[in-house]
């Protein structure tokens, strides 16, 4: 086994955790596998908020006495206001004698491991830690900062344009890239755009992987400090939750009309870029939004990047040269140069997705 490669039971737990990603906020997406006599006899994953945690799911309806439990993240402990029974107690009660933990949970702070050890259970930590850290990156960011993990997503031509509305070019990428975006939308808690995108494109901003509306939709968030977005815009329609972040001084009738459509209006202070983005992200974090895709135009991306609020960049590069149009980041927009860390290229013919990490935080 290569260094850092997870053990086989931990791989089963990681696969279960991966399948639960984006379904559990604000809880982490965790997987657990129970092993008896060298065989995985049960696998569980975190259920949507309020439901069972992965360890409890893996222990349900099986005889766990003397067995080993593999779990991607440290089991939780009792705390005030907790909605579900603590997993560490469930593990102790089930008679598990060994627990292999992938990663310590910053929210649990080692108390889960200590509780198990105090009950006489053998505990190992670190199996698959590197893979699990990558998988839980948004959750770890959320726990570290109280705000969502931010992915800045944009499509650009080879000459760095996000569109050329004068020439009638608004959509740059093909079906494979569009499908990839819908899959990502299906795994995040929110999508953010500015009023410029609402006015230009009137997007619905829903997750439609495989062409079908997902049963769980990310919250739509629109930045509009002055009330420029039409109340009739598609983003304000349908049953998906929508939040408008606006300035206290934006027109009251506009705000009231939005509220009548079921939109949540969030009044926030302004800074030099518009709505105070840091305050907005913290407010979204308080609403259990752990991850967010920013799909706005150049103004939103420039403001997020300049404020060091982007954790990951998804650049969809289309094989086109527009010659003229709206540049992604006009010269002088950013105070400094940025380089993506650990860049990955995904071919999505005819387009290419180039993604990587940015910002000053890493797990
Ligand atoms: N290729 C792509 O990936 C892509 C994606 C989206 C859009 N687009 C294109 O981009 C163009 C629109 O560009 P855009 O830059 O106007 O759209 P945008 O970035 O989505 O919206 C910008 C607007 O958001 C509002 N805003 C409020 N607070 C802000 C803050 N803190 N930071 C940034 N913006 C804030 C401002 O308008 P208020 O004064 O009203 O508050 C601002 O003008 C369109 O042509 C559209 O087709 C391309």
Image (cartoon, rainbow, N blue to C red):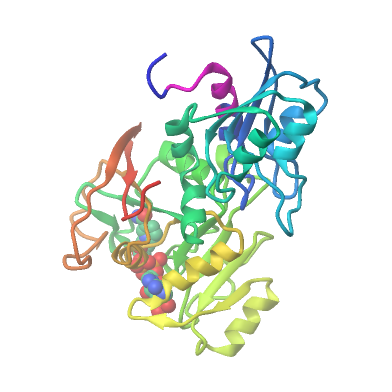
Quadrant for residue 272, please give it: bottom left
Q: Is residue 31 above or below residue 320?
A: above
* Residue drawn at 68 percent across, 73 percent down: 261
How many labels sit on residues?
0
Asked whether 112 falls inside the magenta stretch, the response is no
What secondary structure do most residues of the magenta stretch adopt? helix
Which x, y percent locates residue 284?
A: 55, 65
Left or right for 234, reference 323:
right
Q: Is residue 272 above or below residue 61?
A: below
* Residue drawn at 59 percent across, 48 percent down: 108
* Residue furthest right as drawn: 61
Q: Is residue 329 above or below residue 174?
A: below
Asked whether 11 falls inside the magenta stretch, the response is yes
Which x, y percent locates residue 345?
A: 31, 34
Quadrant for residue 90, please give it: top right
* Residue drawn at 25 percent across, 56 percent down: 161
Q: Is residue 89 visible?
A: yes
Which x, y percent locates residue 293?
A: 46, 54
Which x, y percent locates residue 113?
A: 60, 38
Q: Where the N terminus falls, by quadrant? A: top left
Residue sitting nearer the eye, 39 or 137: 39
Quadrant for residue 303, please give it: bottom left
Residue sitting nearer the eye, 144 or 249: 144
Query: Magenta span covers which residues?
Result: 5-14
Q: Where on the image, by quarter, is ligand 1?
A: bottom left
Q: Is residue 292 visible?
A: no
Left or right for 44, reference 113:
right
């Amino acid at each position: 086994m290569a260094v850092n490669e997870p053990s086989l039971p931990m791989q089963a737990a990681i696969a279960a955790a991966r399948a639960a990603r984006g379904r559990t906020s604000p809880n982490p997406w965790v997987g657990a596998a129970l092993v008896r006599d060298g065989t995985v006899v049960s696998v569980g994953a975190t259920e949507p908020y309020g439901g069972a945690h992965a360890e409890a799911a893996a222990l349900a309806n099986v005889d766990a006495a003397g067995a080993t439990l593999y779990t991607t993240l440290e089991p939780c402990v009792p705390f005030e206001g907790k909605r579900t029974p603590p997993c560490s107690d469930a593990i102790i009660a089930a008679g598990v004698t060994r627990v292999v933990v992938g990663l310590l949970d910053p929210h649990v702070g080692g108390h889960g491991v200590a509780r198990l050890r105090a009950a006489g259970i053998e505990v190992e930590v670190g199996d698959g830690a590197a893979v699990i850290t990558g998988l839980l990156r948004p959750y770890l960011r959320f726990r570290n900062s109280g705000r969502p993990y931010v992915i800045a997503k944009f499509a650009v031509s080879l000459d760095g344009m996000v569109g050329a509305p004068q020439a009638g070019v608004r959509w740059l990428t093909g079906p494979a890239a569009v499908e990839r975006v819908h899959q990502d939308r299906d795994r995040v808690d929110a999508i953010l755009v500015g009023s410029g995108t609402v006015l230009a494109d009137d997007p619905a901003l829903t997750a439609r992987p495989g062409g079908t509306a997902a049963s769980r939709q990310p919250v739509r968030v629109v930045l509009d400090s002055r009330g420029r977005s039409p109340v009739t815009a598609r983003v304000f329609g349908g049953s998906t939750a929508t939040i408008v972040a606006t300035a206290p001084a934006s027109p009251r009738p506009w705000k009231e009309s939005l509220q009548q459509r079921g939109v949540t209006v969030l009044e926030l202070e302004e800074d030099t870029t518009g709505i105070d983005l840091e305050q907005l992200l913290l407010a979204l974090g308080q609403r259990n939004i752990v991850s967010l895709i920013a799909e706005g135009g150049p103004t939103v991306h420039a403001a997020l990047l300049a404020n060091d609020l982007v954790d990951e960049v998804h650049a969809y590069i289309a094989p086109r040269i527009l010659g003229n149009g709206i540049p992604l980041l006009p010269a002088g927009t950013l105070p400094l140069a940025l380089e993506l860390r650990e860049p990955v290229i995904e071919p999505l013919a005819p387009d290419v997705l180039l993604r990587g990490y940015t910002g000053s935080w890493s797990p």
